[in-house]
Amino acid sequence: MRCFIGTLLRIETAFPKSALALLRAKRQLPSVRYPMTFLDLFCGCGGFSLGMDRAGFQCVAAIDFNPEAIETFRANFPDVPQVLERDLTKFPPAELSRLIGTERVDVITGGPPCQGFSRIDRAKQMSLIEDEDQVKAGARNPERNLLYKYFLGVVGAARPEAFVMENVPGMREMQGIDMTMRIRNEAQSLGYNVRCFMLNAAWYGVPQNRWRIFFVGLRRDLGAGANAIPMPPPRTHVVSAVPPEGMSVPDNDWFLWGPKIPASGEPEPAVSVREAFDDLPVLRSGDHQPQVRGQHNTKLPYRTTGGRYANVMRKWGDRVSGDEVTDN
């Protein structure tokens, strides 16, 4: 879990500093006095919001249809003014400004559900598919793979200066259909310069090989030339750039991955799982047996020898986890 949380915490790397600098230069406003705003669609527990918060953005609203996700988001971000338990497929994008109480956001972020694109259990899923429409929509849920259209619908209605959308690499190949190309083309038609980055979380200091595709779009009227084209965040750690097994990648300038992702200065060694767990107390067989089976309520102190990554996970800005952990 801590490795996965680390992935969420590092999500801010998907919004390149070059793009952020371009937005601020266009507005001619100093970053320290102007928190740019964003809307988090399909917000879940708030991984995107946490990264955007670290990057200096202010969340004006978050939306998800899952009640447990919304409850968790509200606990994680009590200061976000609008956290809505709503199904984006049930109302037109034009009504969103009324629901969230504002007509303007600088950036829209989101990760539409990805189960239909996942490579897990792909063979079984494909065995249930009979035509191309089902390939595009997904066998497990005929609507799920088209949720990106609702994301882009909101982008088209709100016209933010930029957007970031995340999904799994499996969308590159759905029975021979490249959904990344389709999504990029639809986003381009809305008036955005769009690039896709296939990033590995381990490149940015997370102790896990977790590949994800990020679509980053900048509105064309922000400027011209290279500065108006999204660029990927430099890799900060040394990790193999071998793509996921069975995954082919295109050789073009709009889909960047691996060798095309620049490294920053002298990249650090990859963070290991051992480093991530380095501050957890050591439990041996038979230690701290609960009086009632299944109940683990004993509080144990974190080890003080924890490394840098472990300490970062426990002391993330104002989200301090405390000095103890339960013995489960």
Image (tube, rainbow, N blue to C red):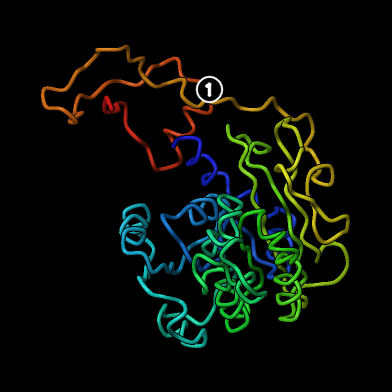
Asked whether, in this view, residue 124 is left or right of residue 318, the answer is: right
Q: Residue 136: x, y in percent?
A: 64, 71
Residue carrying label 1 = 275
Q: Residue 128: x, y in percent?
A: 56, 65
Q: In which quarter of the image is residue 251?
A: bottom right
Q: Residues within 10 Å of mark 1 (few under 14, many from 20)?
A: some
Q: Quadrant of residue 162?
A: bottom right
User: Which quadrant: the N terminus?
Assistant: top left
Asked whether, in this view, residue 279 is left or right of residue 93, the answer is: left
State whether residue 139 is above or below residue 295: below
User: Which quadrant: the C terminus?
Assistant: top left
State whether residue 267 is above or below residue 259: above
Q: How many marks?
A: 1
Q: Which residue is drawn at 67% across and 53% down?
A: 169
Q: Quadrant of residue 268?
A: top right
Residue type at the position of mark 1: Glu
Report the front residue among 175 and 48.
175
